[in-house]
Every structure is written in C-alpha cells, then in structure tokens.
Image (cartoon, helix red, strand yellow):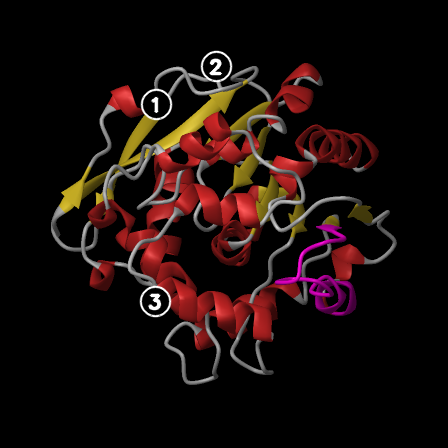
Amino acid sequence: MDTSRTPDAAFADLPDFPFAPHYVEVDDGDGGTLRVHHLDEGPADAAPVLLMHGEPSWSFLYRHVIPPLVAAGHRVIAPDLVGFGRSDKPTSVDDYTYARHVEWMRQALFDRLDLRAITFFGQDWGGLVGLRLVAAEPDRFARVAIGNTGLPTGHGAPSEAFLAWQRFSQETETFPVGQIINGGCTTDLAPEVIAAYDAPFPDEAAKAGARIFPALVPTSPDDPAAPDNQAAWAVLERFEKPFLLAFSDADPITGGGDAVFRERVPGAADQDHVTIEGGGHFLQEDRGAELGRVLVDFIARTG
C-alpha cells in the first residue's frame, strides 16, 4: 500500500488550534503500517470524550468543541481518520473501504489507546465509523451522542442532496476541500480557516480518501458494507445507555435523520435531545462552543 504523509510544516500556525499532535501505528491490512494522528487534551486520568470527524474534514473541526469539555475536567480524544489530517494517506482510492476505516480506528482507539468509559460524539462519517465501533464493543462506551450523521444499510432511497454530492465527488476534476466545508456551513469561513482545512492535502493525490468516501456510503442492500451496518443496528436496538441526538436545523444532507435513532435505540428514550439552531452540516464549525456545552451537560446529567 503506497501512502503519503503531509509534512508537519503544513500544520504550522493554524488559527485557534494550539493542540499538540499524538500518534499511534496500526496495521494497514496489506502487510504494512499506518500512522494515525489524534488530539489528546485534558486530564490523562479522566474518562475520555471521543470526537470523530467526517468527510472531508479533520480534527481541526473540533477546535471550538474541545475547550468547554477540557474546562469541565474531561479528557478529549479527537482522531484523524486515515486519509485525513495528520494521519497517513493511502494514495489509491482502492485502498479505502468502509470495513478498513472501522478496523483502522478500532486498532487505534481500542488496541493502542485502550479507551474505556467513553463518551462518544460523531458527525458525518465520524458517526458511520464510530457507531460501528459502539456496536463492536458496547461495553467500552458510557454514553453516545451523534449529530448530522447516520448508519445507512442501503434500504430506502438516499436524498437528492446526497446523490448530487456523491456525483460531484466522483466527477469533479479538482476536489476543493476547504471550499466544500465552507459550503456546508451556515457561517462564511475566514480564508485562514478554509486554508486550514486544505492544509492536510498538498495535492490531488493526497485526496484519494476524501474523494472516495461519498462512494463508500451504502446506498443499496447489495453494498458490501450493508450487512455489517445491519448487524450494528441489531446491537444499537439493544443499547440502553444514554444516547443523545444533537442534529442541527440547517443540514440538507441529514435533516430528519435523527428520527430513526429516536425510534430504534432504547437509550434515546427520555433524553433531552437538542436541535443546534443555526448550524449547517458542519455544526462543529458553526456552533462549536455550543456543541461542547451540550456534551458537558449530557455527561453531567447522565453521570
């Protein structure tokens, strides 16, 4: 497996991002290893809050979510998915599968970091990968929160907004990561913030993971990931630990996607679910500090 690694210099002087990098190595599934980056903030002996990003962002997305959690005494772990941020980037789209993303994160978070008593929050692909981890080892998790994400099995038609995004990702000659994220926000991002989202991707070859991600979302029951997601749903339908929905009100991709979790996950019953007003698809960017406080309150009342 051929990989690239973005030089450290690309991450110098990012706005509002004073966090030190941390790394673990995982088996790549092809006879080699991959270096996986994560942030690790707050007291090392505190129960971890795991924040997982999606497509095509990286842990920079959580820079405003982390401070309220750390101020409340929590340890925060925010990994970069393989192919994103400071993590290694396989250069062929064929190296990326849904199953591999789950396995790479399982190794990093469970085998290497051995996280337990986890409070999880995932958005976009952070939810698609993270919820599979919850289903794989539910005893490691104390509570779960999600926003603007799902766990698709290929049953039911995807939205036209998602299909348009999927077509764009596969057909566009250049993949403008920073501008894509800007377009998924209700706020107009500053040039230096857009540049920070572009920073992990010095050229188009580094964007193989970002390009292929939309095509890996199961959109039919015949998708290779559909059976694994169905099996994960079977676990979530028995998950009784606190399960919070914190979707935003202005996301055309996942709008209404919280309903299925309200209906099917026992732990979602009787929770004070939250609608993040004024947040687009990337609610962490639009309402990051607010989301951080939502998670602090969620932990406090379910502790």
* Viewer-nearest residue: 147 or 49: 147
Disc 1, SS: helix
Span shown in magenta: 247-263
**For this view, does 162 lie left or right of residue 205?**
right
Q: Residues within 10 Å of mark 2 (few under 14, many from 20)?
A: few
At horizontal 47% and vertical 23% (from top left) the residue drawn is 40
Circle 2 sits on which residue? 18
| Disc number lying in front (3 or 1) | 3
Labelled pair 1, 2 in contact (Cβ < 8 Å)? no
Which one is in front, 117 or 3? 3
Q: Amino acid at mark 3?
A: Gln
Relative vertical location of residue 181 with respect to residue 46 in this rendering, above or below: below
Instruction: Residue 174: tell me if it is visible.
Output: yes
Q: From mark 2 to mark 3, how far is it between C-alphas?
A: 34 Å
Which amino acid, mark 1?
A: Phe
- Which residue lies under the disc numbered 1? 11
Would you place residue 132 above or below residue 12 in this image?
Answer: below
Q: CA distance from mark 3 to mark 1?
A: 27 Å
Residue at horizontal 79 percent and vertical 38 percent from the top:
302
Q: As shown in the figure, which amino acid type bears the numbered disc 2?
A: Pro
- Residues under labels 1 and 2: Cα distance? 11 Å
Could you tell whether 163 is left or right of 36 in the image? right
Which label sits on residue 54? none
Q: State the residue at coordinates (44%, 38%).
A: 58
* 235 versus 76 height, above or below: below
Between disc 1 and disc 2, whose residue precedes?
1
Q: What residue does disc 3 label?
A: 170
Which of disc 1 and disc 3 is earlier in sequence? 1
Which callout, 1 or 2, points to the residue nearer the camera?
Answer: 1
- The image quadrant where one finds the C terminus is top right
Q: Earlier in the sequence, mark 2 or mark 3?
A: 2
Left or right of 261, for residue 127: left
